[in-house]
Image (cartoon, grey):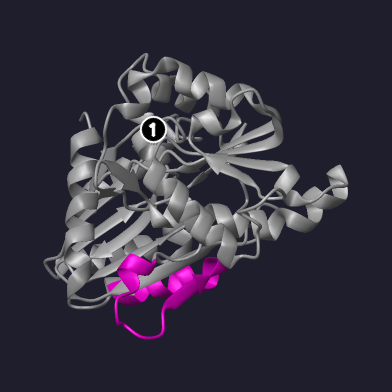
Amino acid sequence: MGYAHIDGKAVKAGNSRSNSSEAQAIATWISQSRPLLESRYGRPVEEIVGVVTPFGAQVLELRKACSANKITVFGRSAMTIGTVHALQGAERPVVLFSPVYSKHADGGFIDASPSMLNVTVSRAKDSFLVFGDMDLLASAAPGSPRALLSKFLDQPCRELEFQPPPRTDLQASQGQLQSLRDAAEHDEFLLRILSSDARRFLIVSPWIKLRTMERTGILAALTTAVDRGAVIDIYADPLLNSDLMPNGARQIDEAGTALKQIGVTLHRLEKLHSKIVAVDDNLLCVGSFNWLSADREGQYVRHETSYVYRGEHIEAEIRATMEDLRRRTKT
């Protein structure tokens, strides 16, 4: 089992729902993985992968996205893309699941039928992969099918090394979309915006390390921004930062103490997957980079990408993000 965290948006389509970001991500992953899958199984990718979603409207989105990536979606040789019933009595080596729900529009349809996920998972011979909002999955009602699925996936090693495409609904008419590659560009970006005259900053980084913030100059930049009058909120996952430091403090407590001293609020939120930076109400950066912990050199350096969205239309997305974080934070 594995997953790719997709920070998408669910929208209503009549009595159904769809999520174009999940559809685009799934189609991109299939296209990128096609050579490896066909080499391993010795047959067309359409016979290897099956895609399942709870909603009929999402089936249409998935077919459209896959067709655009030259994946056959109609006819006898088509890839099976449908609701859970599409794979009833059939199996595939790889099954991909698109849950659709997001922080913008959650619902109980998946949890209302415990057999839905059981049947879907059982159709996968070798791999079952979820492409969806893992933060939402993790906050599902205890004991519910989605909460159980989240528990099975709740290991960093299960996350796919995959960069989802940018969200088309956030690009609007901003022109050239800015992308950040790897640590150097992310650090430069964060230091630059912290030195701006912005008044409110949100940083979501599941992992957090005081040494990383000191070494990169981020802690000093946070200090300067607060002294200028900025309000800064940081969210990190206490479960991922529980290691004891040489001073005897937990990793997250060491960072929290240092941040409190300079006037930055650190919120502890369990099972956090999003990596986000938001500035005021008109800049949002979303991607796979752990802003406050990622290794900048050595064998553990990862190739990460984030996309920067700008404009007045970003305000609603930032507001939805902040409301969701507050809702899920217990303390």
Q: Quadrant of the C terminus?
A: top left
Direction from residue 310 to residue 49 in the image, left or right: right
Foreground of the two, 254 or 95: 95
**Amino acid under disc 1:** Leu
Above or below for 178 versus 139: below
Residue 176: horizontal and vertical position, in percent? Answer: 41, 85
**In this orientation, does residue 3 appear?**
no
Residue reaching furthest to the front: 75
Residue 281: horizontal and vertical position, in percent? Answer: 17, 67
Direction from residue 216 to residue 282 in the image, left or right: left
Foreground of the two, 257 or 24: 24
Q: Quadrant of the N terminus?
A: top right
Q: Main secondary structure of the magenta part?
A: helix
Residue 319: horizontal and vertical position, in percent? Answer: 17, 55
Instruction: Name which residue lies at 64% across and 26% down.
Output: 123
Range drawn in magenta? 168-193
Above or below for 247 versus 168: above
Instruction: Name which residue lies at 42% across and 16% down.
Output: 114
* Magenta run includes residue 173: yes
Residue reaching furthest to the left: 229
Q: How many marks?
A: 1
Direction from residue 212 to residue 11 in the image, left or right: left
Above or below for 21 versus 188: above
Instruction: State the residue position of label 1.
Output: 137
